[in-house]
Image: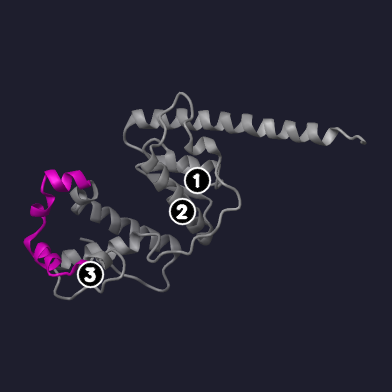
Amino acid sequence: MTVEASSSAASPHATLQTEATSIGELLREHGSLARGHLVSFCLDDPWSSLPAAWREALLALTDAELARLPVDLPVRDDWPATLQRLVRISRRSCALSSPLPREAEADPPSRWLFAQTPRVRNMNLKKAHEVAALAPLVAQTARRCGATAVVDLGSGLGYLGAVLAFHHSLHVVGLEMLPANVAAARRRALEIRARMRQEEAKVSGGAREGGGGGGGG
């Protein structure tokens, strides 16, 4: 197991490399937790696969403390060392440790990013709500960090990536393990780009026509 160490003199690259190594080890050790879904929790009983000392420590927490566990609940010395490490690394790996104030968007996203774009699989209402809330937050965080590119892990059909790319002008790299999802995301991105360009051309054409007609009453 890699010993965690920090130094004020460490370069940003070295710090990122250390964090990436820690996260990689964490995923190898607790991959079943990272791959878990709510339905799996109900059907497969992953709770019983946790170490007994973890379960004892977690059951001792109140509901309010459990809600704070991912963010700011003080890590307790009497917790198992592996649980302490999981909590600390998970928190550090998060881009946000506390909510950011939401910035008002000057222009709404194109309707094609959320509407029923023809010939492709589109978002349901739940996914549209999630993307509409998350995309501005990711873009805001990128601006604060001076980042122009983001990586979307488990990008699925590219719903979030499309909004970040076409509306927030970020370079998006989507990583997805299912080839069918990758192909569908590419088709959807191409269709959205074509629809947005057609719409922009109509708006530009209408502006030229409106500006070209002078006339008196």
**Circle on res. 164:** 1
Which residue is nearer to you in this view: 50 or 68?
A: 68
For the residues bearing labels 3 and 1, Cβ distance under 8 angstroms: no
The secondary element bearing badge 2 is classed as helix
What main secondary structure does the magenta stretch of the protein show? helix
Amino acid under disc 2: Val
Foreground mark, 3 or 2, reads 3
The secondary element bearing badge 3 is classed as helix
Check disc 2 and report the residue beneath it: 138
The answer to whether residue 86 is seen in the rendering is yes
Amino acid under disc 3: Glu
Q: Residue at x 48, y 25 (%)?
A: 118
Check disc 3 and report the residue beneath it: 65
**Circle on res. 85:** none
Residue 97: horizontal and vertical position, in percent?
37, 65
Residue 125: horizontal and vertical position, in percent?
39, 40
Foreground mark, 3 or 1, reads 3
Q: Give the vertical position of 52 relative to 74 (above or below).
A: above
Label 2 environment density (alpha carbons within 10 Å; few <14, some 14–19, many ≥20) = some
Q: Give the vertical position of 112 relative to 92 (above or below).
A: above
Which region is colored magenta? 36-63
Residue 151: horizontal and vertical position, in percent?
43, 47
Most extreme residue toward the top is 119
Label 3 environment density (alpha carbons within 10 Å; few <14, some 14–19, many ≥20) = some
Q: Earlier in the sequence, mark 1 or mark 2?
A: 2
For the residues bearing labels 1 and 2, Cβ distance under 8 angstroms: yes
Distance between the Cα atoms at labels 1 and 2?
Answer: 8 Å
Amino acid under disc 1: Leu
Image quadrant occupied by the N terminus: bottom left
Residue 28: horizontal and vertical position, in percent?
21, 51
